Amino acid sequence: MTHSKYLHVLLVSLLPLGVLAPACTSEGLSSKGQTITCQTDPGTGVILSCVPGGGSGGDNTCTDVDEDGDGEPHDEAEDPNDDSPHTSFSGDDADDDDDDDGVSDDNDCDHHPGEDGDDHGGGGGADLPYDVVPALGATVRPIFDAFAEEGTQPASIVSVTLDGGSWRAAELSAGTPFVVTSADCDHAGNRDTGRDRVVVTWTNADGSTASDHLDIRYCSK
Ligand SMILES: [Ca+2]
Ligand SMILES: [Ca+2]
Ligand SMILES: [Ca+2]
Ligand SMILES: [Ca+2]
């Protein structure tokens, strides 16, 4: 009896702690929660590059709170493909800060194409994942393979543009298959070693046009 009484006391005393600790909080990541400002493509709105700081809110820029500390608006914990997204985007037009990070939707990088709060148009069109990881020795078509990951190929590819450099530009633009070599893994990409960001513009079956960026991470895990 004393044992069950002890358990009861223990459970009651634990309860307030459970209530006070939200299931999902960014407070433990405060060192990673710095504000970043990004340049965006004037035509497509795709994020080009980001620097720490709040910025001036000028044309073709946006702001976000970098939750995972990778220097970019995309936050792993907020990946919509995650089982339990860190932040839920309400999608409520009456709320001008969907993800409650203090950055208004107008200026929030997460509302740019391909970012955390992008609903990808919401239709049945094609969609790109955040990145694709071609394996060493594999025969790949990174853009095609990326669309395949999300399930739907576009009606047509309008353009594939490297955000700096020209690595595999011809194959990527033409959609030509190639074998991934150690040179792909080791080249100085526009994001990192073996890593290039491309901006893809395509048309969907319904005639709509969309753009998104895709990170090609050769030989990554
Ligand atoms: Ca945000
Ligand atoms: Ca974000
Ligand atoms: Ca981030
Ligand atoms: Ca926001």
Image (cartoon, grey):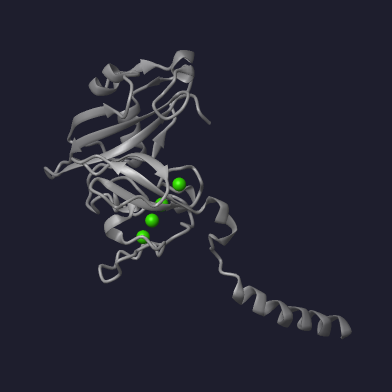
* Residue 130 vertical position relative to residue 97 in the rendered view, above or below: above
Residue 216 pos. (x, y %): 39, 29
* Residue 152 can be seen in this image: yes
Tell me how many marks there are: 0
Residue 171, position as x, y percentages in the image: 29, 18
Say which residue appears at 25% left-offset and 67% top-offset. Answer: 93
The residue at 26%/28% (across/down) is: 161
Residue 11 image-quadrant placement = bottom right
Rendered view: 36 above or below 24: above
The residue most toward the left is 207
Q: Residue at x 53, y 31 (%)?
A: 221
Q: Is residue 25 above or below residue 47?
A: below
Q: Nearer the viewer, residue 21 or 61?
A: 61
> Hey, which quadrant is residue 14 in on the image?
bottom right
Q: Position of residue 136 (x, y in %)?
A: 48, 19
**Of residues 2 and 201, the one drawn nearer to the viewer in this rendering:** 201
Q: Quadrant of the N terminus?
A: bottom right
| Percent position of residue 105, x then y | 30, 60
Foreground of the two, 60 or 209? 60
Residue at the limit of the structure toward the right, as seen here: 2
Can residue 80 be seen here? The reply is no
Up/down of 157 relative to 109, above or below: above
Foreground pick, 187 / 106? 106
Give the residue at the far front of this rendering: 56
